[in-house]
Image (spheres, rainbow, N blue to C red):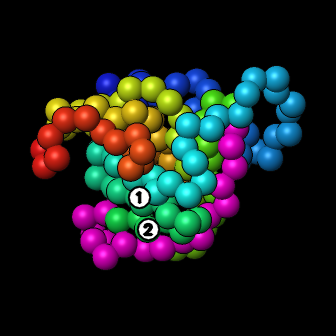
Amino acid sequence: MTKLSLRITAPLTALIVSACSGATERRTEPVFDAIAPQETVTLVGTEPFWNGVIEGGVLTWTTPEDLDGTQAELRRFAGNGGLGWSGELAGERIDIAVGPGPCSDGMSDREYPFNAAVRLGDRSLTGCAYTDASPFSGPEAP
C-alpha cells in the first residue's frame, strides 16, 4: 500500500460505499460544500497513472493508453465527508469520491487540497484532486 492510499480518509471511503450501496442513512453533519457545482474538478493518480476532469457533469478520463480521453456523463451528489459522482465509463460503472485533506501524489513536490478515490469496474484507485478555486501548491510542471 502506498503513502497516497493511506491518506484516503474514512469519510471519503464511506462516501463511495454509500454511493455504491444506495444507502439512505440520515446524518446530522453539514453537507460538504467546499467545491461548487460549477467548478471544474481535476483528479490525478499514479500507480497506475490516470487523470480525470469533471466539468459540467461530464468526466473526461485519460490514461497513458488513452491520451485523447473517454467521456462519461456523471451524476453528482454531496455527502457529509465530500462529494461523489457516479456514472458509466466505457461500459463499466464508475464511482468517484472527493474529500478534504492534504494529498500528495508521491511523484512530485505538489500538494493537493483534496483526496480522491475512484472505483472503476472492479478496480479501486486512489489519487488527489483540485479545482481552479482550490488549486494545488508546488511546481506547475513537476
Residue 43 percent location from the top left of the image: 40, 50
Q: Examine the structure image and report whether residue 33 is included in the region drawn in magenta.
A: no
- Residue 60, disc: 2
The answer to which image quadrant residue 6 occupies is top left
First in sequence: mark 2 vs mark 1: 1
Res. 20 in view? yes
* Front-lying residue, 61 or 36: 36
Question: What kind of element bears circle 1?
Answer: strand
Residue at the location (36% across, 30% down)? 103
User: Main SS type for the magenta part?
Assistant: strand
Q: Secondary structure at mark 2?
A: strand
> Residue at left 31%, top 72%?
66
Which of the 4 image quarters holds residue 109?
top left
Q: Amino acid at mark 2?
A: Thr
- Residue 1 in sight in this render: no
Which quadrant is the N terminus positioned in?
top left
Percent across and percent down for residue 5 are 40, 31
Few, some or many residues within 10 Å of mark 1 (<14, 14–19, 20+): many
Query: Alpha carbon of mark 2 to alpha carbon of mark 1: how far?
Result: 6 Å
Residue range (magenta): 63-79
* Of residues 113 and 95, the one drawn nearer to the viewer in this rendering: 113
The answer to whether residue 28 is left or right of residue 139 is right
Q: Are marks 2 and 1 in contact (CB under 8 Å)?
A: yes
Give residue 52's mark: 1
